[in-house]
Amino acid sequence: GRAQRKKAKQQEKQRKANEEAKAKALAKKEAAPTQSPTTTPTGEDMSDLHGHDVEAAATKIQAIQRGRAQRKKAKQQEKQRKANEEAKAKALAKKEAAPTQSPTTTPTGEDMSDLHGHDVEAAATKIQAIQRGRAQRKK
């Protein structure tokens, strides 16, 4: 009786609610722009992606990108080369500016390149003789 009618009424309400929900979902889906694998988000058709023009354009874009990457790499290498040259130049300038003491100069900068002349040997002999004499007198 009564319970069965009430249950049937509830089932009918539930069925109608389900149908309405499906109808709303369908309407929402139809209103939204569909995007298939051959269309872009803006709706452009891209179904012919294997044509000769497309391949030529892709090749050109790739060549442009490779060229850009090569130029960037070359620019970085040039910067590195210049930095290395500058560092070498600074080191060389510092080395040249620093007073160097060669074997033929004294710490005071006097040139002693001619140490084997006759006059030098005579002077050395005389200094040695004077030192020996002092050493003998001290004994």
Image (cartoon, rainbow, N blue to C red):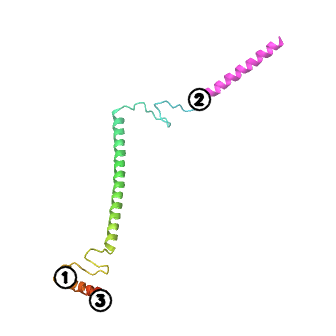
Amino acid type, callout 2:
Lys
Q: Which residue is mark 1?
A: 121
Query: Is residue 138 magenta-colored?
Result: no
Residue positioned 33% across, 53% down in the render = 74
Mark 2 → mark 3, Cα distance in angstroms = 124 Å
- Give the vertical position of 2 relative to 105 (above or below): above
In depth, the one of 59 and 42 nearer the eye is: 59
Is residue 94 placed above or below 71 in the rendered structure? below
What residue is disc 2 on? 29
- What residue is at 22 percent from the left and 78 percent from the top? 113
Image location (x, y in percent) of residue 97: 33, 74
Q: Position of residue 23 (x, y in %)?
A: 64, 25
Give whichever of discs 2 and 3 has the lower sequence position. Answer: 2
Q: Tell which residue pokes out farthest to the right in this image.
A: 2
- The quadrant of the picture occupied by the N terminus is top right
Residue 32 shown left or right of residue 100 in the figure: right
Q: Residue at x 32, y 79 (%)?
A: 107
Is 103 positioned to the left or the right of 68 in the image? left
Residue stretch in magenta: 1-29
Tag 2 secondary structure: helix
Judging by the rendered image, the residue that carries numbered circle 3 is 137
Q: Position of residue 81 (x, y in %)?
A: 33, 58
